[in-house]
Amino acid sequence: MSNRRIYLDNNATTPLHPEVKTALKEGMDAYGNPSSMHSFGREARTLVEKARENVASFIGASAEELVFVGSGSEANNTVLSIFTCTLEKKCTCDRCGGSGVITTTIEHPCVLETSKCLIDKGVNVRYIGVDRYGKVDPEKLAEMIDGETGLVSIMMANNEIGTILDIKELAGVVHEKGALFHTDAVQAVGKVPVDVNELGVDFLTISAHKMYGPKGVGALYIRKGIPFCPLIRGGHQEKGRRAGTENTLGIIGLSKAVDMRRKEMKDEEERLLGFKTRLKEGLEAAVPDISFNGHPEDSLPGTVNVSFEGAEGEAILLYLDMEGIAVSTGSACASGSLDPSHVLLATGLSAEYAHGSVRISMGRETTGKDIDRVLAVFPEVINRIRNMSSAYKKGEK
């Protein structure tokens, strides 16, 4: 076993960037409440508003269009819950439109579980399927949208298989039909270029800890003039759009993470694409009876999802962990479940292959030596598991 531990679960969370660590330490001195009028509060408010401008500009938005939240899950819940306002008659605003929602079968659990809750409340929620790569057909989406549809929510990049969806085209279809469009861009922002104006979205979700920032802070883009109702009420913070004292320290960390993404993202994208090619070619050459999941081209640069016949994903994960290599069997938010990945099943993969899948997600700290180590260890791990399995018979595929 190598002395170096290799972290390949960056889609679940990323290690703090060294510059972010420094910014967090320095930011601890700004402990005033940003809503207070005294000098301590004004100092904190200045930092929050500078961060708002910085993060907003990173995605092509204006500062007034950005709301700081506690997580990507909170942002997604906020957007989806807007469309229950009229239905429940609990909102005092007069801006909320239709309550019908369309989303996909491959969304993050925070969207799918919220959708179930909305159904229980009487909201008409419908799901559009995907092709074998995890893509949504724009024509099928257009056919689904009707006069009752208020919102369509489709992720920009899938957290498990890495597929990048055609958000610009899909948003255009939705707007032609008169509905609003939200994209969960948690896995995309900071990994690939994202511009809200180019995409044409009405809402967009960001999370700091997916791009080397701190946990517990994110942001929600809300296009100016779009209907909005707060999920968390009780205070005037964030211009009445999200109650609760702002997480000044977390916001500082998110802003610094954005600074570093501006400097490093392009070079990192190219480097990870090279590692991805080496990893896929190396695994394919060394391990028989495997298949790769997700789109072969329109995919996150550092994500590889691979299925192994006759080998359980959980067993692969544990054996690799004993070798000091950390991977995942899917979404970290669903890791407590023994069910096969809903994303892989949605792409048409069999339950057997879905159970035998692992996600390798690389990041800024991944090195070429790490990839060499993975390729050296993986074949032995798979062979060991398959030799113990009665389900795998080499050459009988």
Image: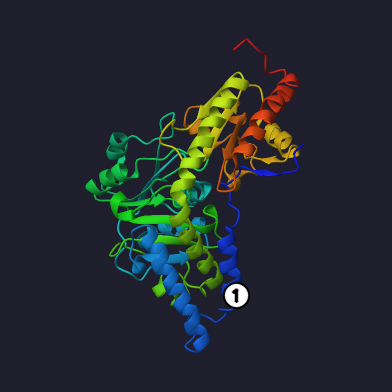
* Nearer the observer, 319 or 134: 319
Residue depicted at x 25% and y 49%:
175
Q: Residue at x 51, y 69 (%)?
A: 252
Which residue occupies the extreme left position in the image?
Answer: 176
Judge whether 144 appears above or below 222 on screen: above
The answer to whether residue 301 is visible is no
**Relative image position of residue 147 (x, y in whole percent):** 25, 48
- Left or right? Give the position of 89 relative to 45: left
Q: Quadrant of the N terminus?
A: top right
Q: Which residue is identified by label 1? A: 28
Relative height, residue 204 to residue 53 (above, below): above
Query: On the rendered image, what quadrant is the C terminus found in?
Result: top right
Residue at the far bottom in the pictured view: 38
Residue 105 horizontal side relative to residue 27, left or right = left
Amino acid type indicated by mark 1:
Met
Residue 46 seen from this side: yes
Q: Residues within 10 Å of mark 1 (few under 14, many from 20)?
A: few
Q: How many marks?
A: 1
Taking the spot 47% from the left edge, 84% from the top edge, the residue there is 42
Residue 381 drawn at (x, y percent): 71, 28
Nearest the camera: 232 or 266?
A: 266
Q: Indicate the position of residue 167 as horizontal and vertical percent values.
A: 34, 44
Q: Position of residue 106 (x, y in %)?
A: 47, 40
Q: Secondary structure at mark 1?
A: loop
Viewer-side residue, 168 vs 144: 168
The scheme the figure's colours follow is rainbow
